[in-house]
Image (tube, helix red, strand yellow):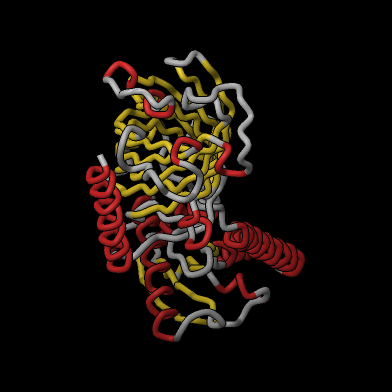
Amino acid sequence: MKKLLFTLALAGVSVAGMAQNNETSVPEMKYSVATNSFWSNWFVQANVAGTAFYSNEEQGWDLAKSPFKGFRNNLGFSVAIGKWFTPGLGLRTKFNGVWGRTVGAEAKGEAWSKDDNANKYWTLNEQVLFNLSNMFCGYSNTRVWNFIPYLGAGVGRNMSANTYAMGLSAGILNTFRLSDRFALNLDLGYGIWETDMDGINEGAIDAKEGFASRDQMFNVEIGLTYNIGKTRWNKTPDVEALKALSQSQIDALNAQLADSQNENAKLKDMLANQKPVETTKIVKEIAAAPVSVFFNIGKSRIASKKDLQNVKDLVEVAKANNSKIVVTGYADSRTGSSAFNKKLSQKRADVVANELVKMGVSRDNIEVVAAGGVNTLSPVSYNRRATVTIK
């Protein structure tokens, strides 16, 4: 049994080393996360467990008997269910069942027999998990190795002696990612229990104090974790980006309103100063006034499809007179290089030209101009646009 436990521990350390090497060679996606719903990030675990006692029967801390040899160790199993409330903090309920061993016969000075050696018991612990890998290195959904210390408390029952005991537990859970759903576990645990746990001297108060007066257990467990439901954490929304997007949309609406107000003022002025016989000319001049279509910063996608409604009115006049249409793209010169703004203004003009084609305008009647970055309007967001004009 001693060799088995040593082999398990050595294998775990080797795998941990490989996991660390994988982590340094593969770029990780680290970011802040938003809290998931209650039903997300649950998991279940199943392990093969090697358990060893160390308490009064090992004569205190003088190691006269090692917990890894003799009668005090054996194989068992454990199962657990838990949930991660954040990438760094979780809870799990863990059941450990062991077909254990006892030193009862030897402690009484009697000859040892197979029947005396039987000692069945189980433990049930509630444990708080601390994923230090996520806490200190940032959350990553592709991290291979997670280092997870834990603390807990629970109850145990020795079925052979028909006794119950309360205890505390601590340990280190190492998980090695196999996929989004599965992970390999290496769990190194320790428990300290009331003296009834191992079935020897149950109910008695030992003269020794401290650790030597308690029943102590060491566990080495290897198994699998299966993640239930949603397994990843979403990025925290970028509030500043959302604010910038909203502000750019507001600026576009303000610019559109300013254009409309300018056109209305121009119409009133022309109606007030022109003679009735020149009505046709006035209408043509009004129709020839540019219509703006606005874009968000750095984008060539139309910010609001409502801008195209005014374009439709202009298109109808152009089609009725078989007129040419000029689409001029602009960019904000305060943002980006001249070369970038030139390409961006070209893309914006092309996007609007494509919309004109969808409205029935012949491509031969559309002239596209890329004006590049400009700073002619205020606020600066008004310069992120394309204009449509009848030639």
- Count of numbered badges drawn on the protein: 0
Specify whether residue 152 is in view: yes
Task: Name the residue: 74% across, 68% down.
Answer: 269
Where in the figure is residue 225, as x and y percent of width and height? 34, 37
Could one spot residue 79 in this view of the protein? no
Q: Is residue 330 above or below residue 41?
A: below
At a point 34% along the width and 19% down the height, the residue shown is: 116
Is 345 displayed left or right of 280 in the figure? Answer: left
Residue 382 vs residue 299: left or right?
right
Q: 70 or 383: which is nearer to us?
A: 70
Looking at this rendering, what residue extends furthest in the front direction?
Answer: 109
Outermost top residue = 162
Residue 12: percent from the left, percent from the top? 29, 51
Report x, y in % for residue 142: 34, 54
Q: Nearer the viewer, residue 304 or 197?
A: 197
Q: Is residue 246 above or below residue 278?
A: above
**In-front residue for pair 31/385:** 31
Q: Residue at x 65, y 59 (%)?
A: 250
| Residue occupying the point 47% across, 27% down | 198
In front here: 208 or 362?
A: 208
Q: Is residue 212 above or below residue 39?
A: below
Residue 36, image x, y percentages: 53, 39
- Res. 274 image quadrant: bottom right
Task: Locate the N terminus by quadrant.
Answer: top left
Residue that sits furthest to the right in the current view: 272
Quadrant for the C terminus in the image: bottom left
